[in-house]
């Protein structure tokens, strides 16, 4: 292997990237576009739920309950003076996600200590948001009922009731429960997979379509030297994209970073090297740029988005699908990113994921070199 020939190949690839401004702009602007799009448009937070209340009781107790709902940041309360007909219409048109019906004799049942009944009407079109809104409402209503009954007992006995459970909840790693802190670290893996696999998946196929591969075949360039030369150019581009995503995520969106920069750099380098090698392998397998692009999209972006735990928890996937997720490196890389950013853990916890990334990168690089050698031969 000659370092001189590898460097010449890298220089050729750098010049090709610089002479193709559209590809360069896409490679540099895509991370920013995805960060802005996903951070603002994709949110798993469920708050300010549109809530309509139909108060049939119209007592001080029912009005206090409504004020509890309105005072919570999770609900945006309006009154449904028109009764069930108005509630149905607002849910049908999407103006209301949650309808709360306070029945007659609500205050009387509360004062008598009888079981309280409350009707919740939910828009199940968005099952996830509807389920979360239901849990929010049930928590507020249960707490109100408990406090009212405790006050009633205290008035009757002339003293506070016996010991009661006082749960103190402490959320670790993401204290505000912001979905942005969960999404952006995983988005770095998706960005790298898109940039790496899609851009490099075109490089060898483009050489064959443009007729420049015959010129490369006439040189003493070896397959490994060609592969490393092409990898070095796109690896540099990937490093720029990685730094851009990390800086924007931490400084602009305020995602906490609690781990080791060195460990983050090593894991990003391993993942990027493997993703680039996979893209070149696809380019060597395909016979056209269109086919290489389609193969890169199907094998990189979709698995990184759907089967890596980026958005959907792997534990909630069907059991048939869960073993398949172990085949995709984005699963391990996203685990590393979230652990470094949010938990601040080190190599003693993440070494298995790093070993997998290293093995994956070595295997894919070997496959790409062999396939490229077959094409060159």
Image (cartoon, grey):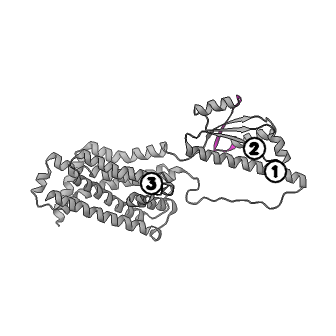
Give how far apart the Cα atoms at labels 3 and 2 are: 43 Å
Callout 2: SS? loop
Callout 1: SS? helix
Snapshot quadrant of residue 160 = bottom right
Mark carried by residue 186: 3
Mark carried by residue 117: 2
374 or 345, which is in the foreground? Answer: 374
Q: Tell me where residue 310 appears, x and y as whole percent.
A: 46, 53
Residues drawn in magenta: 71-82
User: Marks 2 and 3: in contact by CB < 8 Å?
Assistant: no
* Other-residue count near label 2 (Cα within 10 Å), few / some / many at <14 / 14–19 / ≥20: few
The residue at the point 71 percent across, 37 percent down is 101
- Which quadrant is the C terminus positioned in? bottom left
The residue under label 1 is 149
- Looking at the image, is mark 1 or mark 2 earlier in the sequence? 2
- Looking at the image, is mark 1 or mark 3 earlier in the sequence? 1
* The furthest residue to the bottom: 348
**Residue 72: within the magenta?**
yes
Q: Disc 3 vs disc 2: which is toward the camera? A: 2
């Amino acid at each position: 292997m000659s370092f001189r020939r590898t460097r010449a190949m890298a220089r050729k690839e750098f010049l090709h990237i610089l002479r193709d401004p559209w590809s360069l702009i896409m490679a540099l602007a895509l991370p920013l576009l995805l960060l802005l799009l996903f951070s603002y448009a994709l949110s798993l937070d469920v708050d300010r739920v549109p809530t309509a209340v139909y108060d049939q009781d119209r007592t001080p107790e029912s009005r206090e309950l409504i004020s509890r709902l309105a005072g919570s940041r999770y609900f945006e309360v309006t009154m449904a003076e028109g009764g069930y007909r108005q509630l149905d219409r607002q849910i049908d048109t999407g103006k209301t996600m949650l309808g709360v019906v306070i029945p007659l004799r609500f205050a009387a049942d509360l004062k008598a200590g009888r079981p309280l009944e409350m009707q919740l009407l939910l828009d199940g079109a968005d099952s996830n948001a509807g389920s979360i809104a239901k849990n929010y409402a049930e928590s507020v209503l249960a707490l109100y009922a408990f406090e009212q009954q405790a006050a009633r007992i205290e008035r009757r006995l002339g003293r506070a009731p016996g010991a009661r459970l006082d749960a103190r909840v402490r959320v670790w790693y993401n204290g505000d429960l912001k979905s942005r802190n969960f999404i952006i670290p995983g988005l770095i893996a998706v960005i790298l997979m898109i940039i790496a696999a899609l851009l490099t998946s075109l490089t060898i196929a483009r050489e064959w379509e443009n007729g420049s591969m015959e010129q490369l075949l006439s040189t003493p360039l070896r397959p490994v030297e060609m592969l490393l030369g092409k990898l070095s150019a796109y690896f540099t581009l990937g490093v720029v994209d990685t730094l851009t995503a990390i800086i924007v995520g931490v400084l602009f969106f305020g995602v906490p970073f609690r781990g080791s920069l060195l460990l983050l750099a090593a894991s990003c380098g391993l993942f990027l090297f493997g993703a680039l090698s996979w893209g070149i392998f696809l380019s060597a397998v395909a016979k056209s740029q269109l086919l290489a692009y389609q193969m890169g999209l199907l094998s990189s972006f979709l698995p990184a988005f759907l089967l890596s735990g980026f958005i959907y928890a792997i534990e909630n996937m069907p059991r048939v699908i869960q073993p398949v997720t172990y085949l995709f490196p984005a699963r391990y890389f996203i685990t590393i990113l979230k652990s470094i950013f949010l938990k601040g853990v080190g190599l003693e916890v993440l070494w298995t994921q790093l070993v997998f990334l290293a093995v994956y990168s070595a295997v894919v690089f070997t496959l790409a070199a062999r396939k490229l050698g077959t094409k060159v031969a």
